[in-house]
Amino acid sequence: MIQGIGLMNVSTIVNPTLDCIRIRVPQEHYHQPIVSRLISRYNLTINIAAAAFEAETREDGWFNLEIQGSCQQLEAGFAYLQELGVEIERLNLKTIPQECVKNLQILLNSPKKVNNLNLVQEETTHAKFQICIPKNYRSLPVIAGLVSYYGITVNIVRAIFNTSNENDGWFNLELRGNREQIVYGLRYLKQLGLQIWL
């Protein structure tokens, strides 16, 4: 729940363009692609600014999310999180660099690249890999691009991305989609110059 705030009041505290929140994910939801669903179901643009999440641990994981969308999209996304029992805490909006605001807006206003793919109904393919997101990519919504551009479902199995700007982030990802989506998604990550370990 949003600390001290009922769902009915969410629209009064959330900037309809951009907000920064921390979500705490209970263990029972570790295998659900929660961040991916916020992007694909509610058309939110999300950048993971920091994270500590590991499926093998007994502790709840958390993500700091820079999140952009309309007031209605944000309310629907927060309602989904609250139904799952995910805690939502609003963070200081001033901590979001102007560069990140620009990058989120570019992604939000970009045409969905998945529309350009010749997608046919194929069997779902799974891909597992580890990705390093360098500290200088901190303000780019890289994982959101996999979901928004290519229609891939992304489950974050493990994430280490601290709030300091001094260290790179490491994510273990499980991707689900058809073969073409996965190929294009991996190509997108390689075009960004990111290190990937399959």
Image (cartoon, rainbow, N blue to C red):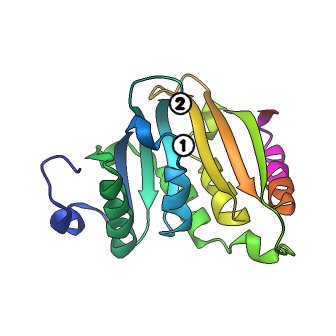
**Residue 91 position by quadrant:** top left
Look at the image and say whether residue 107 sits in the magenta stretch. no
Picture layout, residue 54 above or below residue 35: above
Number of residue marks: 2
In magenta, the rendered stretch is: 186-195
Label 1 near label 2: C-beta < 8 Å?
yes
Picture layout, residue 22 above or below residue 18: above
> Is residue 169 in view?
yes
Amino acid on which disc 2 is placed: Ala
Is residue 165 found left or right of 143 in the rendered image?
Answer: left
Which type of secondary structure does the marked residue at label 2 adopt?
A: loop
Q: Residue at x 71, y 34 (%)?
A: 131
Q: Which of these two is toward me, 39 or 102?
A: 39
Q: Position of residue 147 (x, y in %)?
A: 64, 59
Gap in Å between the C-alphas at discs 2 and 1? Answer: 8 Å
Look at the image and say whether residue 188 sits in the magenta stretch. yes
Q: Position of residue 7 (x, y in %)?
A: 20, 63
Q: Position of residue 177 (x, y in %)?
A: 75, 59
> Quick one: label 2 or label 1, which is nearer the N terminus?
1
Residue at the spot of label 2: 55
Q: Could you say which disc has been placed on residue 31 in the image?
A: 1
Mark 1 Cα within 10 Å, few/some/many (few <14, many 20+)?
few
